[in-house]
Image (cartoon, grey):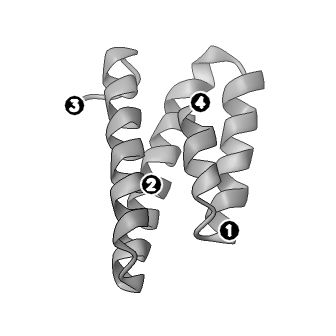
């Protein structure tokens, strides 16, 4: 769900494709890969946040930050990443 929200941001076509690939991997791949999928999704979220700031898109930045915070919380709670 979180990856779908990020993917729907659609601010960068390359990142959107990558998020789609990550989403597919998270939904169909083995659980053992979920940590690396989540890490890459967090990296992409950071890139998208920086890009929205460069473009001056405050609404996209706020939306992406909220998604990123939710993704981080999920990763910590699921023990996929450290705080």
The numbered mark, 4 or 3, whose residue comes first in the sequence reads: 4
**Which residue is pictured at 67% across the width and 55% down the height?**
18
Q: Nearer the viewer, residue 52 or 21?
A: 52
* Disc ID at residue 24: none
CA gap between label 2 and label 1 equals 13 Å
**Which residue is pictured at 63% across the width and 62% down the height?**
10
Q: Nearer the viewer, residue 4 or 42?
A: 4
Which mark is nearer the camera, 4 or 3? 4
Q: What residue would you read off at disc 3?
A: 83
With 48 as the anchor, is 21 left or right in this view? right
The numbered mark, 2 or 4, whose residue comes first in the sequence reads: 4
Q: What residue would you read off at disc 1?
A: 14
With 56 as the anchor, is 48 left or right in this view? right
Q: Nearer the viewer, residue 62 or 35?
A: 62
Where residue 16 sits: x, y (%)?
Answer: 67, 59
CA gap between label 2 and label 4 equals 14 Å
**Which residue is pictured at 57% across the width and 57% down the height?**
9
CA gap between label 1 and label 3 equals 28 Å
* Disc ID at residue 45: 2
């Amino acid at each position: 769900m979180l990856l779908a929200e990020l993917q729907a941001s659609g601010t960068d076509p390359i990142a959107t494709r990558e998020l789609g690939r990550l989403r597919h991997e998270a939904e169909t791949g083995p659980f053992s890969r979920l940590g690396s999928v989540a890490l890459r999704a967090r990296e992409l979220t950071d890139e998208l946040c920086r890009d929205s700031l460069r473009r001056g898109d405050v609404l996209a930045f706020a939306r992406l930050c909220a998604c990123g915070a939710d993704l981080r919380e999920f990763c910590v709670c699921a023990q996929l990443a450290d705080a």
